[in-house]
């Protein structure tokens, strides 16, 4: 690369990733093939529209490319339709809201401090200014069980047009059958934001909401799914010409969604990212991706147990998926940000996060969020989780002792260097 400054930063970031362990649950390491596709000449091409219905010329290769990514996504998740154009998870969610709702309509989503995502109606977002969000949440903070009775009561009263299952900070499984029962009773469209667990669903380690009658799944493609940064919308129904406005019926959801992604909300799709999504979907269709997905959960479960043994207080006392939330104030009387910064010094990357009923502010919350998708990609197994938990404990306990922190940092570096990044191969 001629640009020495950027080249230097790419090299430094590669080194940071090689010598550290990535514990942020929404991050992962992509394959060399995904990186190749992202860096391909498809970045040069504009292709507003959809395969066979584009506005500009020169679509000989973009049409079959996007169709390939669509077909692979449909095969992976068993949906009638896939839209692979959303630039990320937030635009995917907004496109679905806009496809189905009118301003002022109601959406029911998880309480934000119980694990819901910003795009599920945080007051600061544009969606919250357009739509009315009502909430469900955890009934029992010790087990993480959702209060489905309260969900039903609020749904009967508020008549939401969408009931949204999904989270970015909830470590337990959702009961999709209960969501579907309540959704049917109140006539709501069922939407699942599976950004965090899409790879676990694709790898058949967790159930697929579409099998329970959900109408739409939104997702990112870069978390457990291990593709490029991007978004995805899957839906069931009839696919018709997106150039014609259809009636707002469940059957027409695929077309309503296509029209909202483009031209409703986005302009030209990023074809280099769509190429990389296609590669990642193909990788996720391989049998070894199912082994990977199961290993993510096995690692998370073991890490949760090893942390609890060492005095860490986990939100819901464990995990069913890839992520773990720790209440640092109850564990070691520090906040989540301080814990994040201490771990950074020894090469373990995690992120601070709000926990249910958090008394601290979002920038310095009580929680620390961890996950195993990235370290599982590197090849770490259950027994390695003991080391990770011990390093975390020692670093936090000895946070004022630079000598010990330095020794731990050398140990982490030496250990991580034994597990190359997939793109190194
Ligand atoms: N930033 C993502 C996460 O970390 O969960 C969600 O947007």
Image (tube, rainbow, N blue to C red):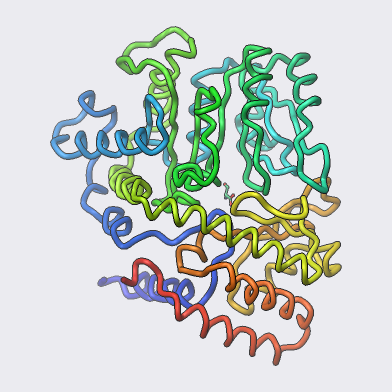
Residue 393: image location, x then y, percent: 74, 75
Rendered image quadrant of residue 245: top left
Q: Nearer the viewer, residue 383 or 105?
A: 383
* Horizontal side of residue 61 vs 289, given as left or right: left
Please report the residue visible at 73 percent of the width from the left and 69 percent of the height from the top: 339
Position in image of residue 44 (x %, y %): 23, 47
In front: 36, or 203?
A: 203
Q: At 69% across and 77% down in the image, what residue appears?
A: 390
Which residue in the rendered view is the most extreme toward the bottom? 403
In the image shown, does 119 or 413 lie closer to the viewer? Answer: 413
Q: Is residue 25 above or below residue 402?
A: above
In the image, residue 83 lies at what x, y percent?
38, 31
Considering only vertical position in the picture, is 384 above or below 41?
below
* Quadrant that contains the C terminus: bottom left
- Find residue 58 and report its image quarter: top left
The residue depicted at 68 percent of the width and 13 percent of the height is 186
* Residue 325 point in image, percent of width and height: 71, 56
Q: Is residue 183 above or below residue 334?
A: above
Quarter of the image with the N terminus in it: bottom left
Which residue is found at the position 76% from the left and 25% from the top?
A: 151
In this rendering, position of residue 10 left or right of residue 310: left
Nearer-the-camera pick, 182 or 271: 182
Pick out the residue farthest to the top: 247
Q: Is residue 419 left or right of residue 147?
A: left
Task: Name which quarter of the figure residue 13 lies in.
Answer: bottom left
The image shows a total of numbered marks equal to 0
């Amino acid at each position: 690369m001629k640009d020495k400054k950027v080249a230097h930063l790419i090299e430094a970031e590669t080194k940071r990733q090689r010598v550290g362990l990535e514990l942020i649950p929404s991050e992962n390491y992509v394959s060399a093939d995904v990186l190749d596709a992202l860096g391909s000449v498809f970045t040069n091409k504009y292709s507003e529209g959809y395969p066979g219905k584009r506005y500009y010329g020169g679509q000989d290769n973009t049409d079959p490319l996007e169709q390939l990514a669509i077909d692979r996504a449909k095969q992976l998740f068993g949906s009638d339709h896939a839209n692979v154009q959303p630039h990320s998870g937030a635009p995917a969610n907004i496109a679905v809201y806009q496809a189905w709702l009118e301003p002022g309509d109601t959406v029911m989503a998880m309480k934000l401090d119980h694990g819901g995502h910003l795009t599920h109606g945080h007051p600061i977002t544009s969606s919250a200014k357009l739509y009315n969000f009502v909430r469900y949440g955890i009934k029992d903070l010790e087990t993480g069980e959702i209060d489905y009775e309260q969900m039903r009561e609020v749904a009967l009263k508020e008549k939401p047009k969408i009931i949204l299952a999904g989270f970015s900070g909830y470590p337990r499984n959702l009961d999709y059958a209960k969501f579907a029962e309540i959704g049917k009773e109140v006539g709501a469209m069922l939407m699942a934001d599976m950004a965090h667990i899409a790879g676990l669903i694709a790898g058949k380690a967790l159930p697929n909401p579409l099998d329970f009658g959900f109408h739409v799944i939104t997702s990112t493609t870069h978390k457990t799914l291990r593709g490029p940064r991007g978004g995805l919308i899957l839906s069931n129904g009839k696919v018709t010409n997106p150039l014609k406005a259809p009636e707002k019926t469940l059957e027409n959801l695929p077309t309503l969604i296509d029209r909202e992604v483009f031209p409703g909300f986005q302009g030209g799709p990023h074809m280099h990212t769509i190429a990389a999504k296609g590669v990642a979907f193909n990788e996720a269709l391989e049998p070894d991706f199912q082994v990977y997905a199961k290993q993510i959960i096995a690692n998370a479960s073991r890490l949760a147990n090893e942390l609890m043994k060492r005095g860490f207080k986990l939100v819901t006392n464990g995990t069913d998926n890839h992520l773990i939330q720790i209440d640092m104030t109850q564990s070691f009387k520090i906040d989540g940000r301080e814990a994040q910064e201490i771990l950074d010094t020894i090469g373990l990357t995690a992120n601070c996060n709000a926990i249910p009923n958090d008394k601290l502010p979002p920038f310095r919350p009580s929680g620390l969020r961890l996950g195993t998708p990235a370290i599982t990609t590197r090849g770490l197994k259950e027994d390695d989780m003991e080391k990770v938990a011990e390093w975390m404990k020692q670093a936090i306990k000895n946070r004022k002792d630079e000598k010990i922190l330095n020794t731990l940092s050398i140990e982490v570096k030496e250990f991580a260097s034994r597990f190359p990044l997939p793109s190194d191969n």
